[in-house]
Amino acid sequence: MVSCKEDQNLVYDIKLSSAGPGRITGSDVIHEPNGMDLAMKLPYLKGVYFFNSQACQGLTIMQIKGSMFYWLNDYYTVCGRFKRTEAGRPYMKCNDCGVRIVEARCSKTVDEWLETRDCSLDNLLIYHSPIGPELFFSPSFYMQVTKFKCGGMSMGISWAHIIGDVYSASECLNSWGQFLAGLKSYGPFKLTKSPTGLEHSKSPSVGTNEPVSLKQVDPVGDLWVTANNCKMETFSFHLSASQVSQLHSRIWGQSGIAKIPFFESLCAIMWQCIAKAKDGHGPKVVTLCKKDPNNPKDGILSNSQIISSVKADSSVVDADLKELATLLVDQATEENSQIEEVVEKDNGVFDYIVYGANLTFVDLEEINFYGLEWNGHKPEAVHYSIQGVGDEGAVMVLPWPKDSGTDGNIGRIVVVTLPENEAVKLRFELQKNGLMLEDDIDS
């Protein structure tokens, strides 16, 4: 484990600059967030991609910035700045103000960094600043390029969730890799979303049930930050391909493995472990976030993930894991339309959270994180987390293709955000269930 004093010396020589589209977008182009976007106004995605020295050979910061001028022509919305209508609804002015670029150096090698398996250190590789309190001067996207002493690099991003979910963010970055490789350059100008009236006229459906996965919070004004009632902690652990196979067969045996996806099986174990970490006091309701198979559409950023809620009628602590996993598959109730309607009911001026409103499980297994290539090389590892999770916590499940098994399984990276006191208890519950090794307890 790295001490706080050592943390300060790991990353240094920090420089800030900006990059924007190479072509003027226009003077009257706006992007109007819909209800689902506004429901995701307070959280931020934080990701970091690690590349070895071969991937970075001959690659300079000027080449990186140069490729972004072409790339951001297609994704000009991430270069805009937010404003409010007279009624208070946020919208984005696509004024080409740009994304913030951060350059830094690291005193470790990429391998040394990854060997720590301490995701809290990743914050040193991700420059983050929330939107506000001056909306018009706040970027929604930061990119930090850190050079390691081995010649490798990391690319860290801070991405305002309001402009798109993690599936959109990943595809957006994968597209940039094509510009960096010279496979794409200037194309015809296209509006990814036509400017429309800023006031929504859609009326909420009569008698629609309130979405369980959405929680209204106290107004945050123009500083878009989730307020927690306790100190939150984020930690991660890796599951090897063999552990994935063993955990799946432990619940289902050899005959049932193909019937229930691993994500729901893992969520059942995590749900039960977290309930025990809470001393048996819930949670009986959880939220699931999964990829919409029809999105994202090419070049269009959106918050299109499928958000569902699941309720257990009996004690989760005492539940059979098979029944719990089956419940997550069969009883998940999609709530996207209800969320949209609740947010639009007051014209998008109130503040809400989804992540951590209930314990939230986020399925990132199908995301092509490793589709971003530098010099024809895929990342050594990709880590993601969510900044701005509510008090009930969240669990993200990412692919770890560097560890693959003979049975077709790949490893997983599991990122957990919980109240600090519950995180300590959860680590030991995970160890007892074979999900964390004893060496991981201190990381």
Image: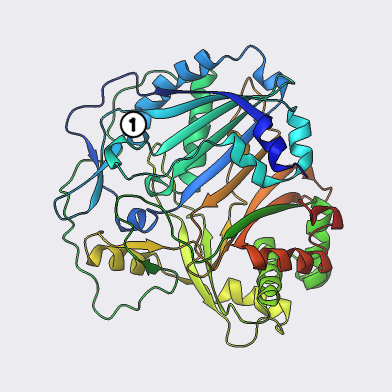
In this view, 94 is above or below 197: above
Out of 175 and 79, give the one closest to the viewer.
Answer: 79
Out of 3 and 299, give the one closest to the viewer.
Answer: 3
Q: Residue at x 49, y 66 (%)?
A: 229
**Residue 258 in sight in this render:** no
- The three-letter code of the residue at mark 1 reads Tyr
Residue at the farthest bottom position: 314
Q: Position of residue 154 (x, y in %)?
A: 63, 29
In this view, 152 is above or below 193: above
Q: Position of residue 197 (x, y in %)?
A: 15, 48
Pointer 1: what residue?
Answer: 76
Residue at the farthest front position: 5
Out of 415 and 34, give the one closest to the viewer.
Answer: 415
Question: Element type at marker 1?
Answer: helix
In this view, 363 is above or below 288: above
Q: Position of residue 136 (x, y in %)?
A: 27, 38
Which quarter shows the N terminus? top right
Q: Residue at x 52, y 20 (%)?
A: 180
In terms of image quadrants, where is residue 425? bottom right
**Residue 165 in sight in this render:** yes
Q: Residue at x 78, y 66 (%)?
A: 428
